């Protein structure tokens, strides 16, 4: 027969063991988080080529052995860092899409679902241009480090297949948003024009990120505005010259 005091002791031992296990797991997650965040910071500041277990451990403030203990190879560590980047960037992607949808609804002929025509196309183009420039400016300033890290992945020439697929999937999520906006503009080739818009945004981001001066909003507005208006002029028959 087990005494009540013996039962209480076993319960206490189990509780202490569980608490110790939880504390150990918490420390492990904290260490892994430090390593992953340090990896993304290094990618943003110095590029993928700068990465090594030693550099990452130093930046994270952890023992060198921890990077291999938790992640094994450097490839695994980089892929895990990208997974963290996707987790961090997804709310921003969702916000961009919501802002694009809100901009469109201001000018749509009906408030229902679907892609209804725009009532005042000139006003919509102007508003969409302002929104795109605003997004570029935000990504070149307050979200600079996040976008810098993403560009390193997007423009990398050689990535492991598994990571490359993840990078492409993230890139296409923004492409999808751009395509939807181009379709609303009446583009005859919204998928192609969406890519052109994305290329332009990326180039303007890179120019702004690399510059020592504040982003040139007037130049951005001119570039984006001309591009979006050009999407509306496709497949329009040329007017014959006077003879």
Image (cartoon, rainbow, N blue to C red):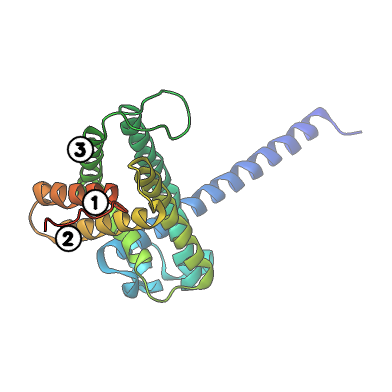
Dot in front, 3 or 2: 3
Q: Which of marks 3 and 2 is nearer the N terminus?
A: 3
Residue 233 visible in rendering: yes
Separation of marks 1 and 3 at Cα, in angstroms: 13 Å
Label 1 SS: helix
- Badge 1 crowding class, 10 Å Cα cut-off, few under 14, some 14 to 19, many 20 or more, is few
- Which of these two is toward me, 174 or 7? 174
- Which of these two is toward me, 93 or 177? 177
Looking at the image, do the residues carrying marks 2 and 1 touch, with CB atoms under 8 Å apart? no
Label 2 SS: helix
Q: Residue furthest right?
A: 1
> Seen in the image, is 83 located left or right of residue 181?
right
> Seen in the image, is 139 located left or right of residue 182?
left
Residue 66 visible in rendering: no
Q: Which of marks 2 and 1 is nearer the N terminus?
A: 2
- Badge 3 crowding class, 10 Å Cα cut-off, few under 14, some 14 to 19, many 20 or more, is some
Residue 165, relative to residue 188: is it above or below? Answer: below
> Seen in the image, is 234 located left or right of residue 191?
left
> Seen in the image, is 46 located left or right of residue 26?
left
Separation of marks 3 and 2 at Cα, in angstroms: 23 Å
Residue 53 location, quadrant: bottom left
Where does the C terminus fall, quadrant-wise? bottom left
Task: Identify which residue is drawn at 44% across, 59% down.
Answer: 82
Residue 102 location, quadrant: top left
Task: Identify which residue is drawn at 47% across, 33% down.
Answer: 114
Disc marking residue 230: 1
Residue located beneath label 2 in the image: 207
Task: Identify which residue is drawn at 20% across, 39% down.
Answer: 130
Task: State the count of labels.
Answer: 3
Where does the N terminus fall, quadrant-wise? top right
Residue located beneath label 3 in the image: 126
- Which of these two is toward me, 15 or 168? 168
């Amino acid at each position: 027969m087990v005494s009540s005091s013996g039962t209480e002791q076993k319960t206490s031992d189990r509780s202490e063991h569980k608490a110790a296990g939880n504390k150990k797991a918490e420390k492990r997650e904290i260490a892994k988080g430090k390593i992953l965040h340090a990896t993304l910071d290094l990618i943003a500041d110095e590029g993928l080529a700068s990465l090594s277990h030693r550099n990452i451990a130093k930046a994270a403030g952890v023992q060198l052995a921890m990077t291999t203990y938790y992640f094994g190879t450097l490839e695994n560590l980089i892929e895990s860092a990208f997974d963290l980047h996707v987790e961090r960037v997804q709310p921003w992607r969702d916000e961009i899409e919501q802002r694009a949808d809100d901009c469109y609804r201001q000018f749509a002929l009906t408030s229902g679902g679907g892609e209804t025509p725009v009532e005042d196309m000139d006003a919509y183009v102007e508003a969409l241009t302002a929104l795109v420039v605003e997004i570029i400016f935000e990504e070149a300033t307050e979200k600079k480090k996040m976008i810098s890290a993403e560009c390193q992945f997007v423009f990398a020439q050689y990535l492991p297949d598994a990571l490359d697929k993840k990078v492409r999937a993230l890139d296409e999520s923004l492409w999808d948003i751009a395509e939807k906006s181009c379709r609303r503009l009446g583009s005859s080739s919204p998928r192609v024009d969406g890519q052109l818009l994305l290329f332009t945004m990326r180039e303007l981001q890179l120019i702004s990120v690399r510059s020592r001066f504040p982003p040139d909003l007037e130049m951005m507005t001119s570039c984006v505005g001309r591009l979006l208006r050009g999407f509306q002029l496709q497949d329009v028959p040329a007017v014959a010259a006077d003879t």
